[in-house]
Image: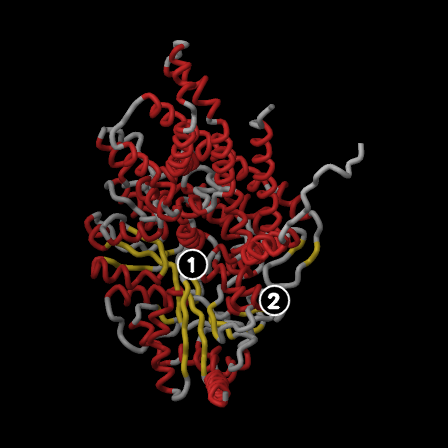
Amino acid sequence: MKKIFLIITAMLALSFSSKADNLRILAEAGDEATLTAAIAQFEEANPGVTVEASYLGWDDFMSTIKLKMADNDPPDLAHGNQGFTVDGTLIQSGLVISLEKYANAYGWKNLFADGALAEFMWSDDGSTWGSGNLYGISPVAEDVIVYYNKDKLNSLGLSVPTTFAEFENALKVSKDAGELPIALGGADGWPIIHVWGLVEGAHVDPSQTRSWIFNAKNTDYSTPDRMKAAEKLADMASAGYFGSDSLGIGYDDANAMFIGGEGVFNLTGTWMTADFNSGMGDNVGAFAMPRANGGVAGGGSFALPWHISSKSENPALAAKFINHLLSNEFIDDLMGVGRVPAQSPTIDPTSNLQAEVIAASNALVGANAKTFYTDWATPGMYDTVTQELQKVIGGAASAQDFMDAMAAESVN
Amino acid sequence: MSTKNIYRPQSKIDYSLYLYILPAFIFYIIFVLFPLADTFFNSFTQWNGISEKKWVGLDQYINNLQNKKITSSIKHSFILIIFYSVLPIIIGLLIAGIMIRVKINGMATYRAILFLPQILSMIVVGIAWRWIYAPKGPLNSGLDFFGLEEVSRAWLGSFDYALPFVGLIGTWVMFGFTMILFIAGVQKIPTELYDAAKVDGAGAISEFFNVTLPNLKGEIIVALVFTVTLALRNFDLIYITTGGGPGTSTMIPSMFIYKKAFQMNQVGSASSLGIMLTLLIFTLVSLILIIFRDKK
């Protein structure tokens, strides 16, 4: 009996003592390589601290994260997702804490340009977005840019487009030469959001698009500029620039096609850099989409935000870990695992492609041209925008139909 | 006459017998009845899944009925009934009818192969067929080989063809089930009936309609109930193959339930749609049972 009592006491003591220095992380699976590197360094720098990370694939993560954070024993640190659907709900329900205290102590806001962190700023009741207190942060930038097949562009006698008109011309020349101008995995729906983000960005002032995303209900969606962008997308689709089968091809398959030499351009996010690099070597380049009136346009944002649970027993340790992710020492490690750091790296890029991607990313940051993702605007927007974009790509809806459906969802 | 003398067996129900079903019943309560009651309650609330529930009465039901996307998704479900239910039953009956007349060697093997789709996971089926229907998949390669390049296309990416082609996957999955059901049913039909039909000079077709079909009524009802239910509550196949797209051309109510609950923070609305779908299935199944009821 005594023995059992001893064992129980020992177990309680162990679990108690381990809890204080134990950090539990729940992350979206795309961050596994990043975290594996960060955790090893963090544990070494902080003896006695153990970090346990678990991962879920995108769909599973997004459909369960709110319930996991509402649990009685949630992870200390977890990813969210920008927008009302995840971040807004977590803040509204008081499940995550404001990071203001830690941001000030560690100086996180000084790391980025003014206003750059707007996508992580919320009112404390989670009702307004784009300003207020800092509720999340990420060390990684994810930009939507244009990747291109260098051999094909050269053999078509084209150079890297510097205006949107040149880009359009490159599409036409590619099509006329029997090439697939743009590799697009439209069956999944969301990859078309990236294409739309760039076409919209080329025509609509980025700050206008951002204010619409932050406050869709009270911002006019149907502006003449955006109508022009929608018409442009519809024209590109009817000209066959996405091929005739894009709605039957998934995102992964489209990228595999592009790596395999099908498609001159691929409009997607910088998270694909490592895959393209290993698949295509020096035959792939990247640039930021040029705007119609000069400058650059880009979708994208920071990567998924890190949140600290309001039930965490050790929020300070969680903040310390976030600070490690944001630290100067870790920036170069982010490059090592193929990610694009949101801050300027101190080491040289590891490949031509990475150099071009970072140049494109810097151009977007410099021009304050990032316009996030259309589906952030309202909880129902993901559904509406993917369905309506599929209709535009498939020729089942006109630019006007698209604008009407989007404007209706904006105020929903 | 007094009823006193009539022998009545004493009610001797041994209540301890109920103990045997208790464990299963507890599971049934926890995993079926409780969630059902909870969903029913949630369907009258506005709730994002974690915050306070707000009672809104029938609002969610009214909103669902007024949502054109939802009503058109119900239309898609009825089209899917043709593919999930009507076609498999016709094919199953045909095969059963042929098997009465024709002896085929190694029938057990063929039966097993034809039944195979039924035991495969829908996820596996969905992934396999997505590959078959892919722009450069076997179906299009086959069409191209026969010089039908004009016909080949991205089947699941087509606004016109996506729904029927997803439906055909359902036909492929379900006809093995109806076939086995009908073959088993045919074997219990007394051979005297067939002999009598032959004596009366019935041909194969008349034999099928006068002997086989009427005697398979029970099996047809079972097949109808089972396949219609599946057509209406089907989720995995659509989720894997098209996700409801392109546009909303393969959208079905169960996809909306998933999207509302897990993407749009509308658990109350998702619950009400779930209850509506349950009621719809219940009504259709009742109709089937009433229409085919034995009129003795």
Q: CA distance from mark 2 to mark 1?
A: 27 Å
Percent from the top left, x then y, of residue B83? 44, 33
Res A69 seen here: yes
Res B158 seen here: no
Number of dots carrying numbers = 2
Q: What secondary structure is found at the residue carrying circle 2?
A: helix
> Measuring 57% from the left and 53% from the top, which residue is drawn there?
B32
Q: Is residue A80 left or right of residue B277?
A: left
Chain of the residue displaying label 1 = A
Percent from the top left, x then y, of residue A217? 61, 55
Q: Mark 2 is on which residue type?
A: Gln
Considering only vertical position in the picture, is A386 above or below B145? Answer: below
User: Label 2, on which residue?
Assistant: A92
Q: Which is more N-terminal, label 1 or label 2?
A: 2
Q: Residue furthest front?
A: B5
Q: Mark 1 is on which residue type?
A: Gly
Percent from the top left, x then y, of residue A117? 49, 70
Considering only vertical position in the picture, is B36 above or below A328? Answer: above
> Measuring 39% from the left and 16% from the top, which residue is drawn there?
B195
Say if labels 2 and 1 share a chain.
yes
Please tell me whether mark 2 or mark 1 is closer to you in this view.
Answer: 2
> Measuring 64% from the left and 45% from the top, which residue is drawn there?
B63
User: Label 1, on which residue?
Assistant: A299
> Measuring 58% from the left and 47% from the top, which residue is drawn there?
B274
Considering only vertical position in the picture, is A30 above or below B4? Answer: below
Chain of the residue displaying label 2 = A
Nearer to me, B7 or B220: B7
Mark 1: give few (<14), some (14-19) or many (20+) Cα within 10 Å. many
Q: How are the colours assigned in the image?
A: secondary structure
Mark 2: give few (<14), some (14-19) or many (20+) Cα within 10 Å. some
